[in-house]
Amino acid sequence: MADILKYQPGGKVEHHIDLLVSHLANWLEEEQGKNLLFHTFSNTGWLTYGVMLEKFQKHDPSVMGRIRGCIVDSAPVAAPDPQVWASGFSAAFLKKHSVATKGTTDASESGMDALVDSKAVVAPKPAVTEAALLLVLEKFFEVVLNLPTVNRYSILVLGSLVYFWIGNR
């Protein structure tokens, strides 16, 4: 959490992405005939993918021709939603103790009585600590996602994605 609160462009996250981009570019250089296909999850995944595209374009544009596509999971949306970000970070912080990691169950399988010929679905409820964490994180992301520097950076990344998906193909 400390890394999030003291986030600065050019910090740890960008450094890790730079290392990954450099590694992939070197691998492609060594392995002629190989291509890349990305698979992203949620907003953080496709935003990271957008940052990677931007870095590939700046450092080694030839790599762009070897990217065959990107599979996008979890319905990303261009407008950042504090609830979505709070849920994702809460699940990451709480790991296996988060309701986000638990599926729904059939009431009859969980030992509860159910009406004949009907399937009642039981969705797990968050614990008090998780509900509090979600509330705090949602308020936090309402502020952070609306900071001018974050908005400008998001626009740049979205521009890279649009260029790659529409203008470069």
Image (spheres, rainbow, N blue to C red):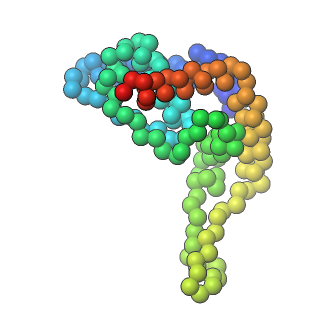
Q: Is residue 118 left or right of residue 148?
A: left
Residue under the image location 67 percent in, 28 percent down: 4
Q: Nearer the viewer, residue 162 or 101?
A: 162
The residue lying furthest to the bottom in this view is: 116
The quadrant in which the C terminus is found is top left
Residue 32 x/y as whole percent: 21, 22
Based on the displayed image, in which of its 4 quarters is residue 19 positioned? top left
Residue at 50 percent across and 41 percent down: it is 41
Above or below for 121 versus 126: below
Rendered position, 119 above or below 38: below
Count every numbered label the image shows and give the total: 0
> Is residue 17 visible from the viewing direction of this image?
no
Q: Quarter-wise, where is residue 86 in the image?
A: top right
* Image spot of residue 152 (x, y percent): 64, 20
Is residue 43 something that shows in the picture?
A: yes
Q: Position of residue 93 (x, y in %)?
A: 64, 42
Q: Is residue 62 left or right of residue 87?
A: left
Residue sticking out furthest to the top = 59
Closest to the observer: 20 or 161? 161
Q: Residue at x 64, y 35 (%)?
A: 79
Picture coordinates of residue 23, whole percent (x, y):
37, 21
Residue occupying the point 46% across, 24% down: 163
101 sits to left or right of 132: left
* Residue lying at the far front of the rendered structure: 167
Quarter that holds the N terminus: top right
**17 sits to left or right of 138:** left
